[in-house]
Image: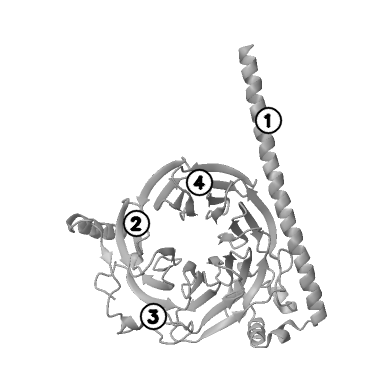
């Protein structure tokens, strides 16, 4: 650890993906990291020394988004293959699959209580799912172009979304209506999210800007210019200034995620590598940190930015140059030379909206509610016998796990395909109905205007 303890320090590398990193998320307990990539894989990295990494195989196209559930015992992923998948973040792997979007899915987001999941898609819709029994609840249609991102507010009462129609919309989850609208004539937002108190939203745009809006007064509070130069920027929102520029990536950075307590954050991008940083911000008093940063900013030479390079040699490895992409997709980081990677294969005979998972729960599992509502149950809530049985089953071959005759499996898969078609048809009809309602509303408004104009003339 460096002497300037408040400065971010690069702790570890994670290399195993063979294409650009699109999304990543740190687990709530800060002990795992999930990453998604253009290589169609989802990977789960454990921070313990000599722990194996898991590579989840199942998506048929680019994985665009990944997120842990609030208790950390579910992973949600979105993909350009039009599906949303739920995974158990260990060697058991896939849990269930949602197929209701009719175009690539761009983002997933759990509500803070873990009861709901919001998904955004290029079919111009946002869909909300109940995690209890994994059921589709409703769609939100008002965007006129691809929806890039949708996020719940901390209290779950609102959803914010951004689209290539150059608008940011805020939705009321109670009445399913759009209650606020921010528009930008310059570009469209790729990412949007609430601040922890739910009073502001931040957006990252295609015009390489970061904007902070106050949703209470509908006002743009802050506006920062960014770039795709391969660096990370840390902004002090209270002071409204850039305080750190972190260098370590060799290409554009696409995704950044902080741990729950803010002591760690990870970054990934076009260079296929994932960097794990330690901030140490939580160890210092806020005013003291601000004073130190102000002193540096005032007395350093232009451009008044503190550039942080990965310090060498790292405490975990002497030769940094040995960290490189392995063609065999082995995981290489600063602590472990060649840890094993386990491929976790998924099954296709899983749910869309109604059924719950790939294995049938026995009475003990159903009583504890794990398979009915896994996102609401912490791992500690599971009975010891249930956990032991589940782990034992995960070591068995796939056919032994399923223990269902092949003919029955084929019939179930056929039924699931028919349900998929039906669900997508309903989704299209719902979208068309919404558009028709919008047109009727516009016609009525125009008719009222004409009527008023005629009255004024007469």
Mark 1 / mark 4, whichever is N-terminal: 4
- What distance separates the C-alpha of mark 4 from that of mark 3? 39 Å
Q: Which mark is residue 422?
A: none
Residue tagged by mark 1? 444
Residue beneath label 2, please? Answer: 235
Mark 3 falls on what kind of element?
Answer: loop
Label 3 and label 1: CA atoms lie apart by: 63 Å
- Residue that carries the numbered disc 4 in the rendered image: 166
- The mark tally for this picture is 4
Residue 83 locus on image (x, y percent)? 64, 65
The residue under the point 61% across, 45% down is 142
Of marks 3 and 2, which one's residue comes earlier in the chain?
A: 2
Cβ–Cβ below 8 Å for labels 4 and 2? no
Mark whose residue sits in front, 3 or 2 = 3
Q: CA distance from mark 4 to mark 2?
A: 24 Å
| Residue 211 location (% of width, % of height) | 41, 49
Tell me residue 328's x, y (percent). 48, 84
Q: Residues within 10 Å of mark 1 (few under 14, many from 20)?
A: few
Q: Residue at x 36, y 64 (%)?
A: 230
In the image, which is nearer the foreground, mark 1 or mark 2? 1
Considering every residue shown, the one lying at the far front of the view is 327
Name the residue furthest top. 458
SS of the residue under disc 4: loop
Left or right of residue 351, residue 162 in this image: left
Residue 439, above or below 116: above
- Depth check: give the residue in front, 90 or 369: 90
Residue 324: mark: 3
Sequence-earlier tag: 4 or 2: 4
Q: CA distance from mark 1 to mark 4?
A: 26 Å
Q: N-terminal of the two: label 3 or label 1?
A: 3
């Amino acid at each position: 650890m460096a002497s300037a303890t408040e400065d971010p320090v690069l702790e570890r590398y994670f290399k195993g993906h063979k294409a650009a990193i699109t999304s990543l998320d740190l687990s709530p307990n800060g002990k795992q990291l999930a990453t998604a990539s253009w290589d169609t894989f989802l990977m789960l990295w454990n921070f313990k020394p000599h722990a194996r990494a898991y590579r989840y195989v199942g998506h048929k196209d680019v994985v665009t988004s990944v997120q842990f559930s609030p208790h950390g015992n579910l992973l949600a992923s979105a993909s350009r293959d039009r599906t949303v998948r739920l995974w158990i973040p260990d060697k058991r792997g896939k849990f269930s699959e949602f197929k209701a979007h009719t175009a690539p899915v761009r983002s997933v987001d759990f509500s803070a209580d873990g009861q709901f999941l919001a998904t955004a898609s290029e079919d111009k819709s946002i869909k909300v799912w109940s995690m209890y029994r994994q059921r589709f609840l409703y769609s939100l249609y008002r965007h006129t172009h691809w929806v890039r991102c949708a996020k719940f507010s901390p209290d779950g009462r609102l959803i914010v979304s951004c689209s290539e129609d150059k608008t940011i919309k805020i939705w009321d989850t109670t009445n399913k209506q759009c209650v606020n609208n921010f528009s930008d004539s310059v570009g469209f937002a790729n990412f949007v999210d609430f601040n922890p108190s739910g009073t502001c939203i931040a957006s990252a745009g295609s015009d390489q800007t970061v904007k902070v809006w106050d949703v209470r007064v509908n006002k743009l509070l802050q506006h920062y210019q960014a770039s795709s130069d391969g660096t990370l920027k840390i902004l002090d929102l209270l002071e409204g200034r850039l305080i750190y520029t972190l260098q370590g990536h060799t290409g554009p950075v696409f995704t950044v995620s902080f741990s729950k307590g803010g002591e760690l954050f990870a970054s990934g991008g076009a260079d296929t590598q994932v960097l794990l940083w330690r901030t140490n911000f939580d160890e210092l008093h806020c005013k003291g940190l601000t004073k130190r940063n102000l002193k540096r900013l005032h007395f350093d030479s232009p451009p008044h930015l503190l550039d942080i390079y990965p310090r060498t040699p790292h405490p975990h490895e002497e030769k940094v140059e040995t960290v490189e992409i392995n063609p065999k997709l082995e995981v290489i980081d600063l602590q472990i030379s060649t840890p094993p990677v386990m491929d976790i294969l998924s099954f296709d005979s899983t749910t869309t909206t109604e059924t719950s998972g790939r294995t049938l729960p026995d009475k003990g599992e159903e009583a504890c509610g794990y398979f009915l509502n896994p996102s609401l149950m912490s791992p500690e809530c599971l009975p010891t016998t249930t956990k032991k049985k589940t782990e034992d089953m995960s070591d068995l071959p796939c056919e032994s796990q399923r223990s269902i005759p092949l003919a029955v499996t084929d019939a179930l898969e056929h039924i699931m395909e028919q349900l998929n078609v039906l669900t997508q048809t309903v989704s299209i009809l719902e979208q068309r109905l919404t558009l028709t309602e919008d047109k009727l509303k516009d016609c009525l408004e125009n008719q009222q205007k004409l009527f008023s104009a005629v009255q004024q003339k007469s």
